[in-house]
Each structure stands twice: as C-alpha cells, then as structure tokens.
Image (cartoon, rainbow, N blue to C red):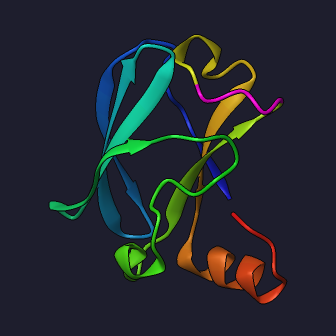
Amino acid sequence: MQTIPIDPIPNQSFNVTLDGNLYGLTFRTIGELTYCDITLNGTLLVSGQRCVPNRAIIPYRYLEGSGGNFAFRVQTDEYPYYAQFGNTQFLQYASSAELQALRANNVQF
C-alpha cells in the first residue's frame, strides 16, 4: 500500500499516477465531513462519496476496474477531517494485486 500525500486544507483537487493509471481526486469538506470525487483516466468513478474511516472510498469492486482503491487510515474511529490530514489521518492506495491478496484473506480494505 502506498500513502498519498494530502494537504490539511478543506477543499483540494489533484492528480496522481498509480499503477499506470491517472487518478483525479477532489476532496470537499461540508460541515465536519469529507466528500470525494474520483476519476480514473478521465472517467468519473464516484462523485460526492462520503469518506468514512478505514473503508474503501470506491464503494464497488466493478468500479475499480484494473486499478486499485483508496481509503483513509485513521488512528481513531473519527471521520476523515482535513485538519487531521497527515497528522492522524492518511490517504492510502492499494493496488489491484494488493486488494486481491487482502480479499483472499478476508481482510477488508
């Protein structure tokens, strides 16, 4: 798994190339919750997806395609919130191969 640097600011967008795929990530803070849009090679995968602690952001395997998935790893069960990005909350990416290995061992990403 790879940790993706994310700034502790409330609203941000950036692109990152992972496993040969270009992901576009947009994070928005509404109240005390974080929402995410993700594109994969220009195709919208999710829009307005609420980010929850230690759960995959892309909710369905078929949307992952040949790519991976993202999750916020948090030290407590608090919902991801921009003020803690890079401090106690980290955005992680798991490749397709890593996801297959986790799922084969009944480990949820």
Magenta span of residues: 76-80
x%, y% of residue 6? 50, 28
**Left/right of residue 33 with respect to residue 12 in the rendered view:** right
Q: In the picture shown, does residue 31 fall above or below 44?
A: above
Residue 78 in magenta stretch: yes
Which quadrant of the rendered structure holds the C terminus?
bottom right
x%, y% of residue 23? 32, 55
The residue drawn where x is 83% and y is 31% is: 75
x%, y% of residue 61? 47, 78
Secondary structure, magenta segment, majority class: loop
Foreground pick, 95 / 56:
56
**Left/right of residue 67 with respect to residue 39 in the rendered view:** right
Dividing the picture into quadrants, the one containing residue 29 is: top left
Dividing the picture into quadrants, the one containing residue 10 is: top left
Which quadrant of the rendered structure holds the N terminus?
bottom right
Task: Determine the residue located farthest toward the left in the rendered image.
Answer: 42
The residue drawn where x is 59% and y is 50% is: 71
Q: How many marks?
A: 0
